[in-house]
Amino acid sequence: MRTAGLGLATGPCGRHNAITDVPGVRAGHVTLVRDPAVRTGVTAVVPAGIGPHAPLPAGLFTGNGYGKLIGATQLAELGLLESPIVLTATLSAFRAADALVTWMLTQPGCSRVRTFNPVVGECNDGHLSDIRARPITETHVLQAITTATGGPVAEGCVGAGTGTTALGFKAGIGTASRLIQTPHGSHTLGALVQANFSGTLRLHGHPITPALLNLPTPQKRFLPRTSDPAPEEQTFPNTGTGTTGGAGCPAGPPEHGTDLAGEQALTDVGPGERTLTGAAEGGVSAEDRQPTSDEDGSCMIVIATDAPVDARQLTRIARRAVYALARVGADYSHGSGDYAIAFTTRTGVAPMPDHELNPLFAAAMDTVEESVLNSLLAAETTTGVDGRTAHALDAPRLLDLLRSR
C-alpha cells in the first residue's frame, strides 16, 4: 500500500513492514496450485520457542463467529497460546490441527505431553479452489512451520491466501507493522491477515467497486457437490512474488521435483517454494455445483507484539483489530467468520497500565487496515475451479479514480 501511494499509512513501520518485525516471530507459506481446480495453501505464524511448556500470553476476539477456529475456547479461557498459528482452507483445517499435534510430539521436552491446544484458523476458498478435494496434507503444514523465517513476508496470492477474495477483488495474505513509543519504551506491533470477506472497498471514505475500475462484476461463490481424487504432487521453486494464477503457474517439469507424500519433502523444499500438482481433469462440472449459503467469506487476523501486556489487554487489542475491518468496508455479514488472535512475545514482566494502551490500539487498527489493502494490491488476477476468475485491484486505475474525486 505504501508503494502504491494511496496516502493512508500512518506512523513509522518496521524494517519489513511485516509481522516478522516483531522480534522472535517468523512466518512461512506453502502454496498449492493444481490446474485447473486447486488454488489453496497454508500460512504459519511461528513465535520462537512456542510450545506447551513455553506458552505466550494471548487474547482472542470474535466479531462474527461463522467459522471453525480450532483451539479458540482454551485460548480464550486460559489466555495462553501454545502452538504456532496455522491458517488454511476451511475443510483442511482439521488435518492442519492434527499436523500441529505431530509437530508438538517431535519437539524437545514434549515426550511426556498428553494434552495440547493446536490453533488453526481458516477461510473458505471454495470460490476459486476445489475445497472438497482437501489437498492440504500434514507434510504441507509441517513444511510451512519448519521453513518459516523472519524478514520479508510474501503477500497476495500465497499460502492460505492463494484462493481467497475480499471486497469484490482478488485478495490473499497481507501484513504490516508499526513502531510504537510508550512510557515503557519502544515496541513493535505487527499484523497478518487472511482476507476473504464481503463488503464494499472504501478508500478515503469513497466506495471502490469493480465496476468503477471497469472490471467484471464478481461471480457468486459456489460449493461443489463432488470431488475427484487428487493427482500426484510435485514441488516447484517460486520464482515470483508468491502470487499464483492460471497464467502464472510454472510450465514444464521441475529440476528437483519432490513427492510431497514422502517425508523427504520437509528437507528438499525450501522457503519461498510452492507446490504445483499436475494438470488433470480434476474439477467438478458446473452442472454438479450448487450456490452456497455461506458465500460471505471470512477474515483471520493475527496480531503480534513485544509490548508488556497480559491476556486481558491482548483481547482488547484483538477487538480493535476486528474493528479495523470496517475502515476498508467490511460488512460483517451473517456468513462471515471475523476473528483476531493477539499475542505478545514479552513474558515474565508486569503488564503496562491500561491507560497507556492507546498507542497499541491505534497500531492494531492501522496495521490491519494496511494489511488488508496490501493483500489486495499484492494479489494477481486468478482463474480457478470451473473457470471462475477473481480480478485483482488495479493500482494505477485506482489512483486515477481517487484523483478524479
Image (spheres, grey):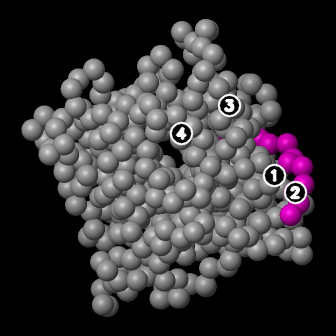
Answer whether residue 256 is visible to the viewer in this image: no
- Contact between marks 1 and 2 (CB within 8 A): the answer is yes
The residue indicated by pointer 4 is 73
Q: Earlier in the sequence, mark 4 or mark 1?
A: 4
Q: Which badge, 3 or 2, comes first in the chain's sequence?
A: 3
Disc 4 marks a residue whose amino acid type is Thr
Give the class, few, some or many, for how many residues have Cα within 10 Å of label 4's Cα (few <14, many ≥20): few
Question: Hey, what amino acid is under mark 3?
Answer: Ala
Q: Which residue is mark 1?
A: 133
How far apart marks 1 and 2 lie (CA) works out to 6 Å
Quarter of the image that includes the N terminus: bottom left
Percent position of residue 170, x then y: 56, 68
* Residue 226 in the figure: left or right of residue 381: right
Q: Element at badge 1? A: helix
The residue that appears at 49% across and 27% down in the rendered structure is 82
- What is the C-alpha distance between the residues marked 2 and 4? 32 Å
* 278 relative to 195 in the view: left or right: right
In the rendered image, the residue lying farthest to the bottom is 404
Q: Find residue 27 and name its label.
A: none
Q: Residue furthest front?
A: 77
Counting from the top left corner in percent of width and height, residue 41 is at: 65, 48
Q: Of marks 3 and 1, which one's residue comes earlier in the chain? A: 3
Q: Which of disc 3 and disc 4 is earlier in sequence?
A: 4
Callout 4–callout 1 Cβ contact below 8 Å:
no
- Highlighted magenta segment, given as a residue range: 225-240
Residue 224: percent from left, percent from top: 82, 64
Q: Relative to 6, say whether 135 is above or below.
A: above
What label sits on residue 99 in the rendered view? 3
Amino acid type of the residue tagged 2 in the rendering: Ser
User: As rendered, which of 5 and 110 lies closer to the eye?
Assistant: 110
